[in-house]
Image (cartoon, rainbow, N blue to C red):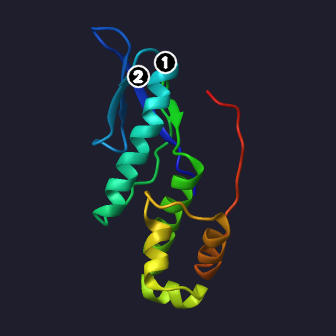
């Protein structure tokens, strides 16, 4: 599961770029230049992913990029929280069941899913193992 979404940059009349996400219509932002627009897009993506999680909505899978689009992802902590949210939803397991499986409380699982809460990667590893998944990390050259 990769949470890398295609974005379209449209030159703005006043200068800079407007950024839109085909897969996430609520996600719209702007930047002074391409680099700033892509940085703002990552922040915007995190806000919209948090909104979907808070509202318990299904997070759409990223579509394949089209010609002229750029790819944007959330930061690693938000990516881990979102991946856990998606994996938990797909598993059919409740937060209470997951808490029992990893030896924590339901509140502990809620903190793992809370974008505002700092969480440790070993906690994600344990939760993902309980869901039959594993967490991997990749490092790429920035755009």
Residue 96 position, x and y percent, is: 44, 87
**Residue that carries the numbered disc 2 in the rendered image:** 9
Q: Which mark is residue 23?
A: none
Label 2 residue SS: strand
28 relative to 62, above or below:
above
Work out whether residue 85 or residue 59 is closer to the camera in this orientation and state it: 85
Please state which of the two labelled residues, at mark 1 or mark 2, is closer to the viewer: 1
| Mark 1 neighbour class, 10 Å CA radius: few under 14, some 14 to 19, many 20 or more | some
* Residue 55 seen from this side: yes
Q: Give the residue drawn at x 61%, y 82%.
A: 130
Image quadrant in which you'd find residue 131: bottom right
Is 91 left, or right, of 10 in this rendering?
A: right
Work out whether residue 110 or residue 5 is closer to the camera in this orientation and state it: 110
Q: Give the residue drawn at x 57%, y 58%.
A: 1
2 relative to 21, above or below:
below
Q: Give the residue drawn at x 27%, y 63%.
A: 55
Residue 15 position, x and y percent, is: 34, 8
| Mark 2 neighbour class, 10 Å CA radius: few under 14, some 14 to 19, many 20 or more | many
* Residue 69 seen from this side: no
Tell me whether circle 1 and circle 2 mark residues in contact (CB < 8 Å).
yes
Is 105 left, or right, of 10 in this rendering?
A: right
**Residue that carries the numbered disc 1 in the rendered image:** 34
Q: Give the residue drawn at x 41%, y 27%.
A: 8
Label 1 residue SS: helix
Tell me the quarter of the image containing the C terminus.
Answer: top right
Residue 25 position, x and y percent, is: 29, 41
Residue 24 position, x and y percent, is: 34, 44
76 relative to 103, above or below:
above
Between the residue at mark 1 and the residue at mark 2, the CA separation in whole angstroms equals: 8 Å
133 relative to 100, above or below:
above
């Amino acid at each position: 599961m990769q949470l890398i979404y295609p974005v379209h940059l449209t030159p703005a009349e006043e200068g800079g770029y407007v950024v839109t996400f085909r897969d996430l219509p609520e996600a719209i932002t702007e930047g002074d230049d391409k680099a700033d627009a892509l940085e703002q897009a990552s922040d915007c993506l995190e806000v919209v992913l948090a909104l979907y999680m808070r509202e318990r909505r299904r997070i759409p899978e990223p579509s394949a990029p089209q010609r002229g689009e750029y790819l944007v992802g959330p930061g690693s902590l938000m990516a881990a929280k979102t991946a856990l949210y998606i994996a938990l939803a797909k598993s059919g397991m409740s937060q209470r069941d997951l808490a029992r499986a990893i030896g924590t409380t339901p509140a502990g699982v809620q903190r793992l899913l809370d974008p505002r809460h700092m969480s440790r990667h070993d906690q994600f590893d344990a939760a993902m193992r309980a869901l039959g998944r594993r967490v991997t990390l990749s490092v790429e050259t920035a755009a």
